Amino acid sequence: MTFLSLQVLIGVFICSWSVKGSSQPQARVFLTFNELQETKTAQFYALSHHPLDYRILVMDEDQDRIYIGSKDHILSLNINNISQEPLSIFWPASTTKVDECKMAGKDPTHGCGNFVRVIQTFNRTHLYVCGSGAFSPVCAYFNRGRRSEEQVFKIDSKCESGKGRCSFNPNVNTVSVMINEELFSGMYIDFMGTDAAIFRSLTRRNAVRTDQHNSKWLSEPIFVDAHLIPDGTDPNDAKVYFFFKEKLTDNSGSTKQINSMIARICPNDTGGQRSLVNKWTTYLKARLVCSVMDDDGTETYFDELEDVFLLETDNPRTTLIYGVFTTSSSVFKGSAVCVYHLSDIQRVFNGPFAHKEGPNHQLIPYQGRIPYPRPGTCPGGAFTPNIRTTKEFPDDVVTFIRNHPLMFNPIYPIHKRPLIIRTGTDYKYTKIAVDRVSAADGRYHVLFLGTDQGTVQKVVVLPNNSSTSGELILEELEMFKNNAPITTMAISSKKQQLYVSSDEGVTQVSLHRCHIYGTACADCCLARDPYCAWDGNSCSRFYPTGKR
């Protein structure tokens, strides 16, 4: 009997939704790193045998390249096979900066290097890249050529300061998005790591940021991700959404609780005329809730957002946002996946603002007059066609935003409960990627969930007639030899490949391995893998256009 047939588990496991004492589903197939390589469906690439903190930062399907940032290196890998034609640039911090970093008492291995944390597509030929620069952030333009076959990859400019574009500390997340050659970043702007900001830089206009040291706006945030998302048909109404978690003091003013948040700003915001000069005048935020209700009515929160994935559709309003959450509870450990409708998120931002009132500073819905245009509206959009710039906003709009950035209602997931819950496991989910699959019996969402144990679980959500659904772990794959926690993931539905990074390197793996389920028709059908179907001879890739 081969190792593959030994690994196949009989039966279909459906998740129990109860937090306490739930029996956790097991993967139908578990493959170790070496077994995965034997299937010929995976490739691994690393620059050296030493851990280098790899992060997948840009996937360019047009040029067939994937761009990776690591310690002192930027990599350009072939999207079809990451171990073929790898291009790398050595980009260390200066010796002076490394010495200063060590003198300041920073970690020589995990701090005093140039950890690349920003790679953004600047134009058709160039990338904009930033690194931590041994606690002195630096940025530069990189030429990647016009076509992949040119094999061009080189630094094309002098280094410039990365302050306001990349965090000083490589262990503090930096998130960014490039829009029309302007960089929007969520990071810490100072050496000490006390001044968090959402910042627009690299701009021909004025630089704009969040209100400094204002805990109503940002309170010790840990940034998770950022995306530009349309809002209606007018492009001027599109918003940049920032996903993060922050520490907020409770009503007693003593205990700090971690809350997951979504904030948004208008990319064409140029700040106020008299108040909030060079500060956002459209900044709003709302709490993101992922929780489960126990039988006794108590709500248990998965309060720490770890990763998000946008599953886009033709209609932006039906975009789904998948979030991976963990819990900071001392009572139980666990992780969960919650799914949000973009329309629900927009409804909360169009709802009541939060207002603090009374001796205990309780949050209540703001009952007073809302100034016009409504705070958070973009200039030049569908609702403000006659206002060209935020500098034309009336003073009462700007004052309102400064004092009321928080929405009163929280954002709840679809059906007000998690899609997937894991408690009592020896792993936690860290990353997520989602693929939409047309199978023989309908359309499915397949989730690829990275763990802190270096594995990826392939999970299919099984639709039910009721508002609950089951889920099945089809595979669990060891991506790295040393169980290094997964740091980033990217998916290409077009190439049918998943790309996964850790400190150890980068692994590319096919989204399906139909042959591992067995050689019989029953094995293939029982697997319930939407990528696979029985073709009369073997378990093979299902194509909706093919005859089965």
Image: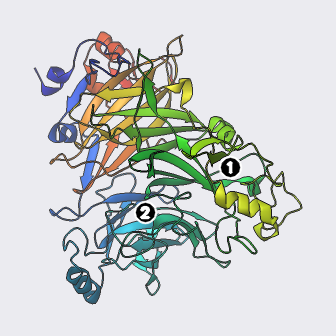
Can residue 123 be seen from the camera position used here? no
Rendering coords of residue 244 (x, y %): 47, 51
Can residue 12 be seen from the camera position used here? yes
Alpha carbon distance from label 1 to label 2: 23 Å
Q: Is residue 497 left or right of residue 73?
A: right
Q: Which residue, given by chain and number where applicable, does mark 2 sit on? A: 174
**Image point (21%, 84%), residue name:** 103
Instruction: Name which residue type carries label 1.
Output: Pro
Label 1: how many residues lie within 10 Å, few (<14), some (14-19) or many (20+)? Answer: some
Label 2: how many residues lie within 10 Å, few (<14), some (14-19) or many (20+)? Answer: many
Instruction: Report the front residue among 290 and 498.
Output: 290
Element class at badge 1:
loop
Instruction: Name which residue type carries label 2.
Output: Thr
**Image point (17%, 37%), residue name:** 32
Q: Which residue, given by chain and number where applicable, does mark 1 sit on? A: 230
Instruction: Report the front residue among 197 and 55.
Output: 197
Q: Is residue 29 above or below residue 219?
A: above
